[in-house]
Image (tube, rainbow, N blue to C red):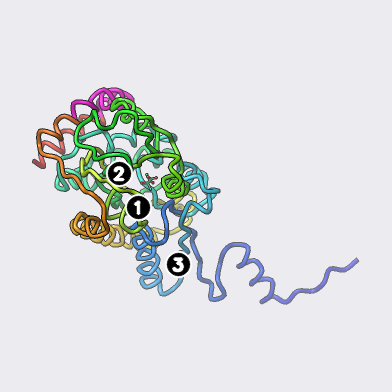
Amino acid sequence: MTFARVSGTALAAALAGMLGLGAAGAETLRLSHNTGDTTTWHQGAEKFGELLAERTDGALDVRVFPNAQLSGGDQMRQAEMVGRGALDLVVTSAINVTPLVPEMAVFSLPYLYANYEQVDATTQGAPGEMLADILLDKGIVVLAWGENGFREVTNNVRPIRSPEDMRGLNMRVAGPMYIDVMNALGANPQQMQWGETMSALQQGVVDGQENPIGAVIIPQQVYEVQKHLTAWHYSYDPIFLGISKAKWDSYDADMQAILREAAQDAMAYQREITREGTAQGIAFLREQGMEVYEPSADELAAFRTATQPAFDQWAERVGPEIVGAFQDAISAAN
Ligand code: X2X
């Protein structure tokens, strides 16, 4: 019995196809993220691909898959998939990684941060490195930190001015820590994929949700289905651009340096456009007909007090060493 003869070139092309290599020997990496293709997450991911293609003369490029398509719509599964090499790259936010790495909840502890200087002192400094080290143990190399942002609450029932106003509201939340925060406020939290949230809001399955203005609320047009927004800044959520360690280890030091720099530049761009969108965001949302409430310092203090039990519970889960390192960097940045 004889096998059909295959030309060397055809065989190489077939192998290249199996390995994800393009015709010119270029490699296309797959990047998964869990928001729509209009968000700053997506823009940051696309920027990374552009910079990488440019700086490797086309040897490496990136295909971006939005809406958690590559993890069957499950936004929390992406990190685990990257960790075991089933995905090359991920852009996701810290809260989505908490089922795999509970310490990632540190960033989002209620009212941990008061401003962007404090944020940058942690995500762009040694505290961020502590988390990157833990993720490395799970097979994920963090290349750069970007921004989802300060999460603001929206709903269709009433303006939220005090913790009491949250009582009894059915709130969609992204992850486990927010369930405890919402419970502390007397709301009824329900964990749901972001991909299912817009229709749940539209149909009244839930009354409200919480997300950052510049990265998500505006680009995903949450204002079309929500009446009230309160800028309570109750929790900060960073994103990161990560690569599977298996993939990372397949490159030499020069290529790794290009990957890391392209990621750093892309996430710097992503943070910048997210902050710009957020700064202009409240005026824009009012133009769209939303009622936006900006709490006073005293009102913010009341929210902080009401969410303290969830802070304490999760600070314990994260551990004093990490929480302490974050708090020290935050005090130094004041
Ligand atoms: O699901 C959300 O709310 C989002 C998009 O902000 C996260 O990925 C945490």
Residue to which mark 2 is pinned? 154
Q: Residues within 10 Å of mark 2 (few under 14, many from 20)?
A: many
Residue 168 x %, y % = 34, 29
Name the secondary structure under disc 2: strand
Which of these two is toward me, 37 or 26? Answer: 37
Callout 2 touching callout 1 (CB < 8 Å): yes
Q: Residue type at mark 1?
A: Val
Q: Residue type at mark 2?
A: Thr
The segment highlighted magenta reads: 304-321
Residue to which mark 3 is pinned? 60
Rendered image quadrant of residue 257: bottom left
Q: Main secondary structure of the magenta part?
A: helix
Q: Residues within 10 Å of mark 3 (few under 14, many from 20)?
A: many
- First of labels 2, 1 by sequence position: 2
* Residue shown at the point (17%, 33%) measured from the top left: 327
Q: Which mark is residue 179?
A: none
